[in-house]
Image (tube, helix red, strand yellow):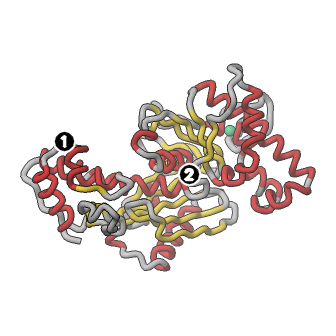
Amino acid sequence: MEKLKPVATERRRQMRNDIYRYIFYSKEPVSKQQIANALNVSRPTVLQNLLELEEAGLVEMAEIRESQGGRPPAAYVAKGDIKMALGVSLSANQLKFLLSDLKQNVLAYKEIDLEYQTDSDVFAITEEQLEVFLTENHVDRKRLLGVGITIPGVFDENTKNLILSPTIKLKDFRIEEICKKIPYPLFFENDGISGGVAEWLSRDAEEKKKDFVYLFLEEGVGGAIFLNGAPFYGVSHRSAEFGHMKVESNGKICNCGKRGCLEAYCSALRLSTELGITIDKFFEDLEDNPEYQKIWEDVLEHLAVGINNLRLAFDCDVVLGGFLSYYLQPYMGKLKEMVADLSIFGEDAEYIKIGQYPRRAVMMGVAWHFTNEYIENI
Ligand SMILES: [Zn+2]
């Protein structure tokens, strides 16, 4: 890949960036005329910028398919494989790696089961396994934009320290300690927020403007809020901690030490670690096992309370994500009925949706941090 030609003014750079981003975000290849119309610029300007972007290897001409109406005009697409970003999900039981190119195509994926980790050893394992993963997949480190790591925890907005992670039993952890040992740009984010970002990215420009909340269901329970076309993080970067919303006044003890949190009822750990089985096994046996049926009923009841609370607070779509949502599909009818019964407005619960990437959203969302930074700075 060649370097982009320097431009004389910031205004010129912004114009070239606008053209690049327009091509990048278009679902279909776009012609010069479409770009000129959409951005309200002249065709010669489009042509000159396209030439520079093409020379630098950032865009290319799409393959032209002959149609009955003759040859369609030349159309352009952004190239995906010139850079890549790695998303890592670190949780109590698993370490997951996902490598994606600029266009969110998954290039490689790996899951590693962990013994339950209670201290910073998890970071030593992450560091070691990260190099193993990159080597196994022959990753050209020069093309790697960075490594995004998600943790089920809350980060301090200023110091970037991990304030609290009940799920992996860490508190006040200096995240920069591992930054020293991993030789790539690093970014840390809460897993629920990262999952929500991936969901938001999967939407087209119009859909992105619609408000929604994302309820993330994995070993921990969390989420993300999207208002006015952007993520809403809150004053202390602690918004959407839906997992610790109380659903029983003196209920089951939660990982956070308090009682009756949504996470204590609806975490995937309840259906796996707490029963000494895998989550796949739980759902395989559910139909024939009355004990599992009782637990599942209880999960759905509390999930319904949580979803109804979110609807009351935000009055928008509630999107379910995280790997537990992958298993929820056959029970959506029942869940919607339970939620509708709780509604004070007598509305149905068609506002509940299942996310686009139930299993891989968190890694895609956190890797996006680097992709986005790259695209914005072209
Ligand atoms: Zn809690």
Lateral position of residue 150 relative to residue 271, left or right: left
Lateral position of residue 39 relative to residue 146, left or right: left
Which corner quadrant of the figure contains ligand 1? top right
Identity of the residue drawn at 35% across and 52% down? 25
Q: Is residue 91 visible?
A: yes
Identity of the residue drawn at 45% across and 64% down? 105
Point out the tag, 1 or 2, that comes first from the N-terminus.
Answer: 1
Looking at the rendered structure, the secondary structure element under dot 1 is loop
Near-viewer residue (89 or 355): 355
Looking at the rendered structure, the secondary structure element under dot 2 is loop
Whole-percent x, y for residue 320 in the image: 62, 44
Quarter of the image for the N terminus: give it.
bottom left
Q: Which mark is residue 356?
A: 2
Q: Is residue 236 visible?
A: no
Residue on which the image places disc 1:
40
Whole-percent x, y for residue 301 in the image: 79, 37
Q: Amino acid at mark 2?
A: Gln
Cα separation between marks 1 and 2:
33 Å
Q: Amino acid at mark 1?
A: Asn
